[in-house]
Every structure is written in structure tokens, then in C-alpha cells.
Amino acid sequence: MSFQFIRDDLSNQKALSRFRTVTTAASLTSGTISIDGKEYINFSSNDYLGLNNHPAIIKALNEGAEKYGVSASASNLVTGNNYAHQALEETVAAWLNKQRVLLFTSGFAANQAVMQSLGKKESVILMDKLSHASMIDGALASEATVKRFLHNDYQQASVLANKYTDKDLLVASEAVFSMDGDTSDAREIASIAKAHQGLSFLDEAHSIGVFGDEGQGSSNQDIDIVMATLGKAIATSGAFVACNEELYQYFVNFARHYIYSTAMSPAVAWATKKSIEIIQQESWRRARIKSLSSMFRALLDDSVELLPTSSAIHAINVQQEDKALAISEQLKAKGIWLTAIRPPTVAKGTSRLRVTICANHNDNNIKYLAKCLNEVLV
């Protein structure tokens, strides 16, 4: 058999404690997860607002399937925008105060679409070093010059931008960084782009729903392009890109991931519209994340290395892959599901436990988590 690298790479993953397997979950409801007949308190979910299994969203999903169908059956450009798609686009545009919105089947596809379609030979894509893999892959697959500035180092970003004044500049970052839980400065990103007559881009995957008075995320109106996923706090699936009219028309004509993919399920689009309505109305869910997060930080032993965060993500750096795996297994024995995050998802030597606190956790869940972490870490 050829492709010897397949066996070599898999063997190397195992030796480095980086080998991954897929676990089958029997159910995922109300802050818990059931695997192999055992139920765990789930602290690895991105269901930040606890909207998964919300009866009103499920009802809207069923209603959408009955009215508009389960499958779009083609791309938007082939058979047109379904009414459910149009209704969702208009809802998001009003929510974020943007002129237009495009829907995608995943955040990965949306990020790649933006980076590749704007990444021409005359362009420079300047992005935070900790930007998501989909942004990095999309940029590197484009024709643009790609430069990455040190994490949240806007002075360095400005210096780099000044070296390419003869090129079109796209400044890109995440709003909340998925593995660290810290935030970027949207105003700084927008300012650097505007100073060079460029465009700014913000990935709101882990901030949409959680930040903002109505859950509209952390970006301000100075950000030109906003991408957010629907499968985290919004609790459905897919993604959107919000922008102005000109960019919208450009993406419709040149974003290959939009042109050549079957559109999002109309039923899911209809359910997503209902989810956003709930997010706008129920601010207590965001307040609940903040209060539980404060409790969690207060209960952890001072010796636990918790990375600074103002989001629902709380990363505990344990450095080594084998140690992260061992601690994760110890926590499973105590009834807690907390997945070990290892390279290449994070840098070598920064393997971690990534705690996500959701609105459907209760005080006792948080107290028990802190107690168990103190037992296995201190």
C-alpha cells in the first residue's frame, strides 16, 4: 500500500497524545450529555444561551419544514431565495444594522468565502495570529499577501499595514477567541482599516448572542464585514455574512462557497429566525452567563492557571497533552464532560481544559465543577 504517510502520521499522533476519536452522544439536552449510558454535566458545549431544545425553536423548525421544506434542493442562485431564507436575512440585517446578509451552510465556508473572494493579488490580508483556522486557510488559499500580527497587538498591526500602502487592505480578527476566551478591540481593527481606506472583518462566532444589549455581538458599526455562526449561541446551524450592498453583490457574484453550495435548509432558516427573536428578548440569558462565570472564577483555587476572559469561555492551561487528557478522564469519572484541547488546535505547550459556561447551567453545577477542578489540579 502506498501513502505510507497516513500510517506514520497516525502513529505520531498517538505518540504525542494528540490522537483524536469521535464519540457518539445519545442525547444533548439542558446542560448535560449522555454517552455510553452515562450522563455528564457538559462543560464543552457552545450552546451558550441554553437554547438547544427550546420548544419555540423546535416548533418553528417543524413549521418551517411543513411550509418551506427541509432541503433547499439547490443553491440560492439556481432556484432563488426561499422565503424562509429572505426572512432570516432581513432579520439579521435589522439586528446588526447592516444593509445586506448572505447565508452559508457553515462558518468555515463563510470565512473562506470572504477571504478567498477579497484576497486578490493586489490585496493584503492582515489578521490576528490567533484567528480561526477557517480564516487562515481561506487567506492562504487566496492570491493575497497574508500577514499575521501578534495577538491583539494593534501597534504591530499598524506597522505592518503601513508597509503596504499601495495595496488593498483587509484587517481581520475574531471578536471572541475560541480557545482563549479573550476579546479583540473592534474599534482598533476598524480604525486601522479606515486609515488605509481598507475593509475590516470580524468573526463573531463566539460573541453573537452573548454580547450586546440584544445579543448582536461585540462589533460596532465601523466594522465592514461581520461573520457569525448559527450553531453556537443561536442553537441551529449554518452561518451568515453581514455587509453593505456593494460587498453583498460582490460576494453573490464571486464567493465560490456561496455560488456552488446548496443553500441552507429553509426549515433551519425559519427556526433560526425564531431563535434570534428569543435572543433579542431574553437578556437574562446573557446576565446568567456573567453571574455563573463570576462564581466560577471566585471558587477556583488561586493556583489554577485560568486565562483572562470576559466571555463564556474559560481556558485552564495545563501545558502538556498527556496531562490534559489525564485530567479530562479524571473529570469524566466524576461525572463532568470537559474535553482536553491539544495541538494543533492550540500551540504546543498550551494544552488546556476549555470550560464553557452556559445559561442552562445552575449554581450547583458550577460549584461542583470548581470543587472537582480544585481536586484534580491543585
Image: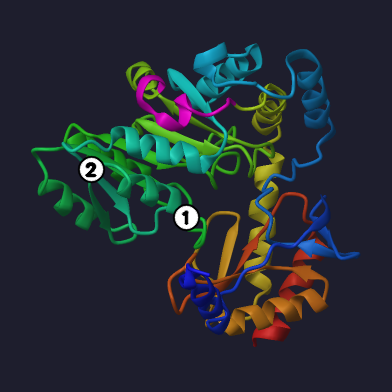
Cα gap from disc 2 to disc 1, whole angstroms: 24 Å
* Residue type (three-letter) at the residue carrying disc 1: Phe
Looking at the image, residue 271 lies above or below residue 293: above
Q: Is residue 26 magenta?
A: no
Q: Position of residue 345 (x, y in %)?
A: 49, 64
Q: How many marks?
A: 2
Image side of residue 254 versus residue 273, left or right: left
- Residue 163 in sight in this render: yes
Which segment is the magenta one?
252-263
Residue 3: % across, % down: 47, 67
Q: Is residue 302 visible?
A: no
Image coordinates for residue 260, horizontal then vertical, percent = 48, 27
Q: Secondary structure at mark 2?
A: loop
Figure check: 157 above or below 239: below
260 is within the stretch colored magenta? yes
Residue 197 as seen in the image, left or right of residue 38: left
* Image quadrant in which you'd find residue 326: bottom right
**Which mark identifies residue 177?**
1
**According to the image, label 2 marks what residue?**
144
In front of the other: label 2 or label 1?
Answer: 2
Q: In the image, residue 151 lies at what x, y percent? A: 34, 60
Outermost residue on the front side: it is 1
Instruction: Identify which residue, 317 or 138, lies in the foreground.
Output: 138
Q: Which mark is residue 293?
A: none
Quadrant of the rendered structure where residue 285 is?
top right
Residue at the location (33% across, 46% down)? 141
Check disc 1: other Cα within 10 Å, few if <14, some if 14-19, many if 20+: many
Q: Badge 2, how many Cα within 10 Å: few under 14, some, many 20+?
A: many
153 relative position to 361: left or right: left
> Please, what is the three-letter code of the amino acid marked with disc 2?
Ala
Q: Nearer the viewer, residue 166 or 115?
A: 115
